[in-house]
Image: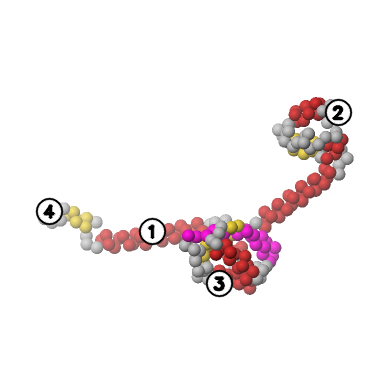
Amino acid sequence: MSVAHVKGGSPVRRRGAGGVAAPRQIADELRHQNERFSAAVENMSHGLCMFDADERMIICNGNYISIFSLDAKIVRPGIAFLDILKHSVDIGVASQSAEDLYAIRKPYIERAQASTYEEILSDGRIVSITHRPLASGGWVSIYEDITEQRRAEQELKEQHRRFDAALANMSQGLLMYDAEGTLIVRNQRFLDLYKVTPDDFPLGMSQRALLEQMVTAHLSVDGH
């Protein structure tokens, strides 16, 4: 706040007013930044854990604790990375020893190398771990439970296998087109019936082009 100088009428600042306000504003801003950072970390859909150059945890979020079923009273800022691995072994979550798990990660830590790898937990869940080094010498790890994703991928592969097996054992030739009239499936029986090769009728060709190809090759199209 400014007041008028008695003699000259010039404004002067009250002694000490600025000196008190600046540190308080800085402290408030730092508090707000920390609150925003904490909110962002806690609202991530993935687990997050940050470590310093001494391999001690700086911060982690609730999803990290949840994914590995860790005890939040034990896994606190300052705990050594190896001790976290030992804790995961003690509670029966890890499917390997702490030393083996540490040996997998140590090369990435030492080389400050970005990487993504997967870990299978003792209950069969699959966790994708993304390791990102920090300029300060530490690193950030992002954790995602991809169990359902991997199961869906495996189920899709199995469906494809069954579909391919069904096509291969059909006694009839089969062609399948998508909504745009593009060839998306043709079985071996079709190729055998017309004595052609996959290169003669590649997937992706249009129905019109396929018919023209059949006519050009003097193939019978009755019933097809």
Q: In this view, does 195 lie above or below 163?
A: above
Residue 76 on image: x %, y %: 52, 69
Q: Determine which residue is flagged by label 2.
A: 220
- For marks 1 and 2, the one nearer the N-term is 1
> Given contact means CB atoms under 8 Å apart, are the residues at marks 3 and 2 in contact?
no
Three-letter amino acid code at the position of disc 4: Gly
> Given contact means CB atoms under 8 Å apart, are the residues at marks 4 and 2 in contact?
no
Report the mark closest to the observer, 3 or 2: 2
Q: Determine which residue is flagged by label 4.
A: 8
Residue 172 in view of the camera: yes
Of the pair 95 and 43, the residue shown nearer to us: 95
Q: Is residue 56 magenta?
A: no
Residue 87 on image: x %, y %: 60, 72
Residue at image point 77% right, 36% down: 199
Structure colour scheme = secondary structure
- Crowding at dot 1, Cα within 10 Å, few <14 / some 14-19 / many 20+, comes out as few
Left or right placement of residue 17 versus residue 103 in this view: left
- For marks 3 and 4, the one nearer the N-term is 4
Cα distance in 3D space between marks 3 and 4: 66 Å
Three-letter amino acid code at the position of disc 1: Glu
Q: Give the SS element for disc 1.
A: helix
Marking on residue 74: 3
- For marks 1 and 4, the one nearer the N-term is 4
Cα distance in 3D space between marks 1 and 2: 80 Å
Instruction: Give the magenta-colored segment's residue range.
Output: 117-135
- For marks 4 and 2, the one nearer the N-term is 4
Residue at image point 61% right, 72% down: 86
- For marks 3 and 2, the one nearer the N-term is 3
> Given contact means CB atoms under 8 Å apart, are the residues at marks 3 and 4 in contact?
no
- Crowding at dot 3, Cα within 10 Å, few <14 / some 14-19 / many 20+, comes out as few
